Amino acid sequence: MKLRVIKGIILKDLREIRREKMALFWIFIFPIMWITLFGSIWGGESPPITLKVGVVYYNESSPFTAYDVVGIMKNVTLEGVPLFKVSEFKNESGAIESLKSGRVDAVVVFSKGFGANVSGGRQAKIYMYFDKTDPQDYQITSGIVKGFFSEFEKEMKKRSLEMQFKYMEAYIPKEIIERHNLTVEQIREYMLASAEPLVIEEKTVEGETATPIQFYVTSFIGIQFLFATMLTIGNGTLEEIEKGTLRRIAASPATAWDFLLGKMLSTFFIIMISIVIGIFYSRLVFGETIYPSFLGWSLIFIASLFSMSLGLSIAMLTRSIKSTTAIVNFISMPLLFLAGIVLPESVLPSWAKPIVNYFPLGRALKDLRLLELYNRPASEIIPDLIWLSLITLGALTIAVLLYNWVVKRLE
Amino acid sequence: MYAVEIKNLKKSYGDFQALKGIDLEVEEGEIFGLLGPNGAGKTTLMRILAEGLKYDEGEIRIFGESISKRTRRLIGYVSQESIAYNLLTVEENLNFYADLYDAPKKKVSELIKRFNLPPKKKAKELSGGFKRRLNLAISLLYDPKILILDEPSTGLDVPSRRKLWEEIKQFKEEGKTILLATHYMEEAEILADRIAIINEGKIIAVGTPKELKEMLGEESIVQVEGLLKGAEKLKNNFPRVLEKENSIRIHVKEPRQALPKIIEILIKEGSQIKAVKVEEPTLEDVFLELTGRGLE
């Protein structure tokens, strides 16, 4: 291995890249564009949502009516944001039509005599309509509407019990209670537990989950593996063949390993600059980012090396810049989504999950996220790093063999 | 011991046989010209020597040693295409190749000075002449004993060509062996100590320019210039006639007797003759004699 040759190739490549406008775009502008775009769309905190609810009720003259419930619905807020935007409909069919056409998210119909029944201590009926076309939307909408009415019902129960206690204290003779070795307080607790057997107290914690910005910084790193790394080394080597300079390099005292090591280190250096720009830009603009640890950088290095081996192999097999670019895009485009690069593994279909786990670039990125976003210990990641290193070594050997095969056949 | 010794060298590209058994010896310190038309096999031969292009059969020795990656360091090769990186400056290109060949760094500044190269100018901004000089400088970085020049003056204007010839002569004075491929007979004639004429992958003659011309014996050349018609008629009367753009060269044994007949035929065919010269044969005439066609 000749260090002077390797240094020469690295410097030559970096100087060429510095003067190549398209390369500068991919190194400096692309990370900024990517982080800005995804940070603006999905970054920051998500405010509570407001549901559009259509209501149908009948005018009544009872002490408490559906009109009062609708009034509460209109005023209920979460973190200062109204929970419902209520639209009143004259009849049920009009409300359902609005639900079908997506103008409202849910319809609540208060039955005739609702107020009279509630006020008279009888059961009162409410009909709820939801659109089940999108299961996730249905889950959220029905959860919120039913949650509201469940809380409302609980409050009604409490008030009804309070009334019952007042009657109990006033009208049940104390001797009867004492005969059964009971206190009024014990009866009160028993009645409360009958009405509400579970007492749920809600507490919140700050979870160790990744923010969208952090997720998209790692996505950007994955994109660099899939496109920039593969194309830089593959097309860079083909350009040397087309120009005739590779023949000269091959005829010089430099070995194939000297040339490839120089090319790979210069490519890694370029990708690293791009990643560092993305990391710091994200911190500067959105206040959030990730700072890869030594193990994180090791994962990035191994993944880059795998990606370079793949790119070089494709280039050596096709021997054409256009074909290499087409094949790299053909492979990388679906992997962008299916290998969990820009979409979280949790939202991928079950058949795509093995790609995340067994395609080395998907696996490396998953490990990087576990390490840097979810603070998993190094001991959990190291076995994967060894597995990735072995796969990469295999890919690199194939790439070098193909390179040697091509160089020997240079005409 | 020869600087370059080649025996029965054969090379094919698929079905096309580029070299059909080349035998050649180049003495140390001489300028050896390889003269032949485009496609004769000159570049293939040079790339085998300098770039390690695979060959099918034969034996090559450089200063007595079988050709290998080690002997290639004894050879500097100036190809027809520029090997400079367009986006790098002259100095950066030289530095890169110096690293590649482990050449001393001081050689870079020496060569920049020697060839009067603009160090900070990018290779893509250089004129054809400067590009050729940069290629030359790159090939001299590691001080090779043999310099192979493939069509070095193609595309150069006359002053640049003359300057290049002076430099080639200077290399010889420095003790280098030079293998010069060209299809310009003037270049071969002025520079080469010995010349091999190559055609269709075969060496058809080797010798000094004088020896090669003597192959034509007592023949002289009648060159007629003008708007000429009747070359076919001339070919019926004289066996070797070479047609060029505005002239015809006719090989004759007795110019005094042949001249009136030549003029008669041309005028009869409607030619407008501007000048008639009787010349000594050139290497191109030798090539015509040997192959029946011109060099270009």
Image (spheres, coloured by chain):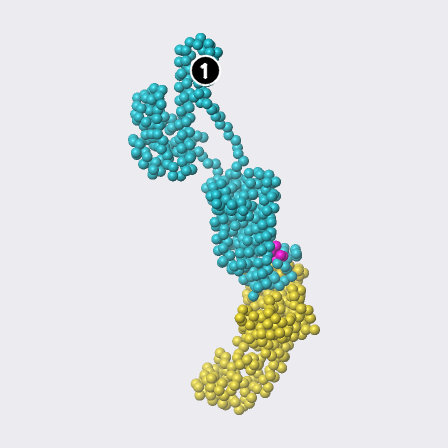
Above-or-below relation of B76 to B272: above
Apparent colour of chain A: cyan
- Name the residue at 65% across, 68% down: B67
The N terminus of chain B, quarter of image: bottom right
Residue at 61% from the left image edge and 66% from the top image edge: B52
Q: Main secondary structure of the magenta part?
A: helix
**In the rendered image, is residue B129 in sight?**
no
Q: What is the chain letter for disc 1? A: A
Q: Label 1: which residue? A: A187
Residue located at (58% from left, 38% from top) = A376
- Residue type pointed to by label 1: Ile
- Magenta stretch: includes residue A262: yes
Toward the front, the furthest residue is A180
Indicate the position of residue A264 as horizontal and vertical percent values: 59, 53
Residue B111 in picture, x, y percent from top left: 64, 64
Camera-nearest residue between B238 and B256: B238
Which chain did the image draw in yellow?
B
User: Does residue B29 show up magenta in the picture?
Assistant: no
Q: Relative to A136, does residue B150 appear above or below in the rendering?
A: below
Q: Classify mark 1: helix, strand or loop.
A: helix
Q: Which residues are magenta?
A: A257-264
Q: How many marks?
A: 1
- Using the image, determine if residue A399 lies above or below residue A300: below
